[in-house]
Image: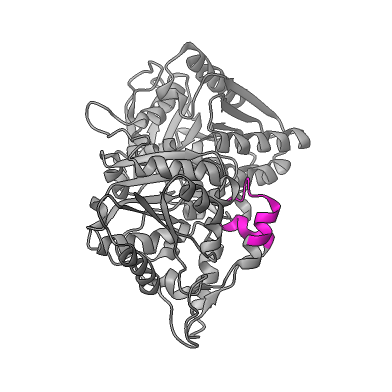
């Protein structure tokens, strides 16, 4: 028999599992929804601290009460914050647990508190302010009904379920978010399954992309003991689609699911595949974080195109983005057509880094414009993927020397699991101020749904304000089509987009 031990996330208690648990039980499984202290379980004594160790002990108590027995396999399921006490408990009962299921959650690391996994910077700051009060047993108040979205997409959750979620929510003990998780490494050897909710901005493809970028904490996810599922719903699948969740958990318990592809010499990551066009092998000039590709016969200051890579990209990624074939390919293509091609590295290593990345890009652009071989009054900026929010600064107040702004398969609004970005990084609002600035957007027809929504919202806003925008469609193209879709359609899209940018630079 499979024994599921279910652990819920911030502000919530065992009640969120009611429907999913009933479906698991009807399929013959034994189910225990853990009542964490202060979140549906025992209330701590006044003035005492409830921390992560308290919640780990809560999970351990259920594991120990269940016992192993012949033919009984314990599957721990952690949703959201709940994955932290789940992994902490599994690390101490490695011989008792058959599998860990990460339900739309992060990947806890030794020595890192759960607060680090909260994507919204404002929420993290709120928690830190509350913790600074010095009040023993301080807690974070639960969100109002219309604020759950800040903690994860509520897509698909019926109104009555959202009402109940709000009514039964508990203040979350701050100590559980602030105390670092301590692990021996035993849990890292267990079979595990990730269940990703695509409506919350997560997908297997995105995890694969992060693995491809060399993120150290994710390397082990390509092993044979790790499987993945996707659910087409928001962050609360036990409320939005409990039947699909129960079916998925049963499959996970059997070891089913999709596996990631390891990255090695015989299977290079997609971002290191060759550029789809044959471009001249021009020399580059490297200064700090900037590379310049100069036209072969430069007889005076030339216009320039600055190519801004996407992200977030782990700080440990090697090679760094300015050496990726797609960026060097575009830069050489531009230089071959008589303008200076520029690649750069900026520090968008996490969702919280957009302000730092924006500063890096602005500084790099000014250094490029100061180069005597560059015409400072004829510059174009070309953004890719996750650098889409950075376009907002340039549209909100376009300088006279900016002759064109282009974006390939951009993410034009925060994805649901990003939390809030600073107001300046919202392209759909900034485009109203773009005026006559020419815009070029290259749209991948096979884009992931969550990114495609942000693009359509931006295009709607651009149309509403009469922005000067040209859309280059790649109907059968995927995100990053320049390396993975080596088709005539893709080549034509690159030619057309570059042709538009060059026209605005040179006329």
Name the residue rendered at 29%, 62% in the picture.
67
Q: Is residue 134 above or below residue 187?
A: below
Name the residue rendered at 26%, 38% in the picture.
224
Q: Is residue 398 above or below residue 504?
A: below
Q: Which residues are magenta?
A: 145-164
Quadrant position of residue 444: top right
Location of the C terminus by quadrant is: top right
Residue 394 position, x and y percent, is 61, 43
Quadrant position of residue 413: top right
Does residue 232 appear left or right of residue 32 in this picture?
right
Furthest residue toward top? 488
Residue 252 position, x and y percent, is 38, 42
What count of labels does the image hold?
0
Q: Is residue 405 above or below residue 176?
A: above
Near-viewer residue (92 or 271):
92
Does residue 186 appear left or right of residue 1 in this picture?
left
Near-viewer residue (363 or 31):
31
Near-viewer residue (214 or 23):
23
157 part of magenta stretch? yes
80 part of magenta stretch? no
Residue 420 position, x and y percent, is 58, 55
Report whether residue 187 is seen: yes
Furthest residue toward bottom? 47
Q: Is residue 240 above or below residue 142?
A: above
Residue 368 position, x and y percent, is 46, 40
């Amino acid at each position: 028999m499979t024994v599921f031990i279910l652990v819920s996330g911030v502000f919530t208690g065992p009640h969120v599992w009611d429907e999913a648990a009933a479906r698991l039980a009807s399929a013959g499984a034994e189910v225990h929804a853990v009542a964490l202290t202060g979140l549906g379980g025992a209330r701590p004594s006044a003035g005492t601290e409830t921390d992560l160790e308290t919640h780990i002990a809560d999970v351990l108590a259920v594991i120990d009460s269940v016992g192993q027995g012949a033919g009984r396999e314990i599957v721990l399921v952690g949703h959201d914050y709940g994955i932290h006490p789940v992994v902490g408990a599994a690390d101490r009962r490695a011989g008792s647990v058959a599998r860990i299921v990460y339900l739309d959650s992060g990947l806890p690391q030794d020595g890192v508190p759960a607060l680090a996994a909260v994507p919204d910077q404002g929420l993290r700051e709120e928690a830190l302010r509350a913790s600074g009060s010095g009040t023993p047993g301080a807690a974070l108040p639960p969100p109002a009904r219309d604020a759950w979205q800040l903690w994860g997409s509520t897509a698909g959750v019926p109104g009555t379920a959202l009402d109940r979620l709000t009514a039964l929510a508990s203040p979350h003990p701050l100590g559980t978010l602030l105390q670092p998780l301590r692990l021996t490494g035993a849990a890292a050897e267990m079979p595990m399954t990730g269940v990703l909710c695509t409506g919350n901005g997560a997908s297997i493809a995105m995890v694969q992309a992060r693995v491809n970028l060399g993120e150290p904490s994710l390397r082990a996810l390509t092993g044979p003991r790790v499987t993945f599922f996707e659910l087409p719903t928001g962050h609360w699948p036990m409320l939005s689609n409990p039947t699909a969740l129960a079916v998925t958990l049963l499959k996970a318990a059997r070891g089913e699911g999709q596996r990631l592809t390891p990255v090695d010499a015989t299977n290079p990551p997609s971002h290191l595949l060759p550029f789809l066009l044959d471009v001249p092998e021009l020399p580059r000039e490297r200064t700090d974080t900037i590379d310049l590709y100069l036209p072969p016969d430069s007889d005076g200051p030339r216009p320039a195109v600055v190519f801004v890579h996407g992200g977030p990209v782990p700080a440990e990624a090697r090679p760094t983005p300015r050496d990726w074939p797609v960026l060097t390919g575009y830069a050489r293509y531009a230089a071959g057509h008589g303008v200076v091609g520029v690649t750069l590295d900026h520090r968008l290593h996490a969702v919280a880094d957009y302000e730092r990345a924006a500063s890096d890009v602005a500084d790099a652009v000014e250094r490029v414009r100061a180069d005597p071989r560059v015409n400072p009054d004829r510059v174009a900026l070309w953004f890719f993927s996750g650098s889409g929010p950075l376009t907002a600064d340039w549209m909100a107040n376009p300088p006279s020397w900016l002759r064109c702004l282009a974006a390939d398969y951009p993410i034009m609004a925060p994805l649901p699991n990003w939390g809030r970005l600073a107001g300046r990084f919202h392209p759909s609002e900034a485009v109203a101020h773009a005026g006559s600035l020419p815009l070029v957007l290259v749209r991948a027809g096979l884009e992931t749904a969550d990114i495609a929504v942000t693009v359509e919202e931006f295009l709607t806003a651009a149309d509403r304000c009469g922005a000067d925008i040209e859309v280059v469609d790649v109907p059968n193209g995927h995100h990053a089509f320049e390396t993975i879709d080596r088709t005539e359609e893709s080549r034509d899209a690159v030619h057309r987009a570059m042709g538009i940018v060059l026209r605005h630079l040179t006329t």
